[in-house]
Image (spheres, rainbow, N blue to C red):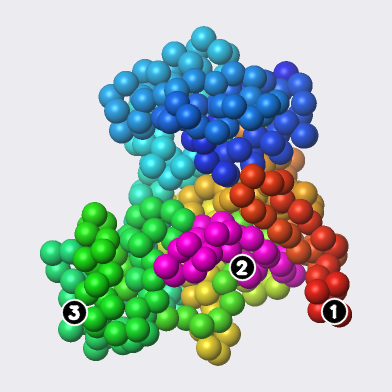
Amino acid sequence: MKTILITGIGGLTPRSIAKTIRRNHPGYKLIGIDVNKKAIGFFMKGLLDDYSVCPRCTDVEYFPFIERLVEEKGVDYAFVQPESEIVEWGDYFEKRGKFPCPVFMGCKSLSESLRDKAIMAELLKDTGFIPKTIKVTQENPRFEDVEKEIGFPCWIRATEGTGGLGSLKLENLSSYKSWLFINNQIPEFTVSEFLTGRHLANEMLYYNNEYVKGAALECVEYVMANIAPSHVTGNTAFGRFLNEDRVNKFCDDCVKYLCDKLNVPAHGILSFDLKEDKDGNMKVTEVNIRHMAYTGVMAQVGFDLIEDTIRVMEDGNANNVTRDRYHHYDKPYVFFRDVDVEPIVLESERMFVER
C-alpha cells in the first residue's frame, strides 16, 4: 500500500486524479491538502483518507508543513497542482537538490516560462507555433500596437491564471479600453490575433527528454459558458477524442523548440491548448505544466496518464510506461462534463447527427 499526497484538492483536476487513483488502487491511502478550509475535496465521501489545510505555497511555512506531513504520514510520493505550487516545488529542488518527496514534474525554468503566457509568447515569437501576440499592461496598454500590429477582432487574456481569466474577443479599440478598465485588478495581458477554428487540446508525457506518449481531443462546448463574457471557460462541457497524429506531432515539435531554447530537458506532464486559424493551421494558446482537467475522462477511454505517473514515481523510471506517441482511441468517443456530476462518455456522437 502506498500513501499519496495530492495538493490543491479543492480543484477539479486534483479531484479527478484522486478519483482515478481510488478506482485503480483502492488500497492506496490518499491525503489531500488545500489552502481553502472549505475545499470541496475535503468533504467528498470516499475521496480521501486524510486531509489538511495548508499554508499558501508562497508562505515561509509551506514547505516546513509539507516536510512534516511527509514524515508523519509516511508519504511515498505526491501529485502537485496547480501551477503556482509546481513552480515553488521546482524552486525547492533547485535550492536543495531534492524534493520533499518523489514527484514527476519538469524543472523550474520550464515551469516558470510556460506558466506566464507572455514569457511563452516571447520564447515562441517569430515561429509558426503561436498566433501573432504582444504583451500589454495596465500601465502600458500599447493602444497603437494593438490596433496596427494585431488588429481587430483580437483575443485578450491574462498572462497568468486559469479558466480563461481575463479573456474576451475584442471588436475595436473602445472595447479594449473598456475591458482594461473592467479588469483593472489584472496587471498584465497578452493580446493575440483572433483564431476562428477548432479548439484542440492534448496531454503528453515526457521522461528525461523522451516523448513517451500523447493523445488529443477537441473542446467543443464549455461548462457555464453563458456566464463568461468570452463564452469560453477552463472546463469543457462537450468534447471529442481525436485520432489526429498531426496534433501530437505539432505539440512535440513545439516542446522540442522550447526546451532547446531554454537548454532544459522535457520532463513530466505537459498539456496543450490550441486553436486553428481559418485555414486549419494550429496555434498554441497555452501550455500547462500539469495534468489537465479532463485527465480523468481520458483515463476512462484508455489513455491513463495518472496511472503512468504512478508507474514513473514508483519505479523511478519510465521503463514500464507503454510508448504511445500517437495514441489512437478504439472508438470515436465523445464526453460530457458539468458541475456536480461525473463525466459521461459515449462511444460516438451518432445519435446527435442522425436526429
Residue 255: x %, y % from top left: 50, 62
Residue 355, disc: 1
Looking at marks 3 and 1 on the same chain, the residue that comes earlier in the sequence is marked by 3
Residue 143, disc: 3
Residue 279 higher or lower than 99, as above or below:
below
Residue 268 higher or lower than 314, as above or below:
below
Query: Quick check: marks 1 and 2 in contact, CB under 8 Å?
Result: no
Residue 235 seen in render: yes
How far apart marks 1 and 2 lie (CA) works out to 19 Å
Type of residue at label 1? Arg
Residue 248, disc: none
How far apart marks 3 and 2 lie (CA) works out to 32 Å
Q: Residue at x 86, y 80 (%)?
A: 354
Instruction: Say which residue label 2 marks.
Output: 221
Looking at the image, residue 82 sits to the left or right of residue 338; the answer is: left
Looking at marks 1 and 2 on the same chain, the residue that comes earlier in the sequence is marked by 2
Magenta span has 236? Answer: yes
How many numbered discs?
Answer: 3
Q: Which residues are magenta?
A: 218-243
Helix, strand or loop at label 2? It is strand
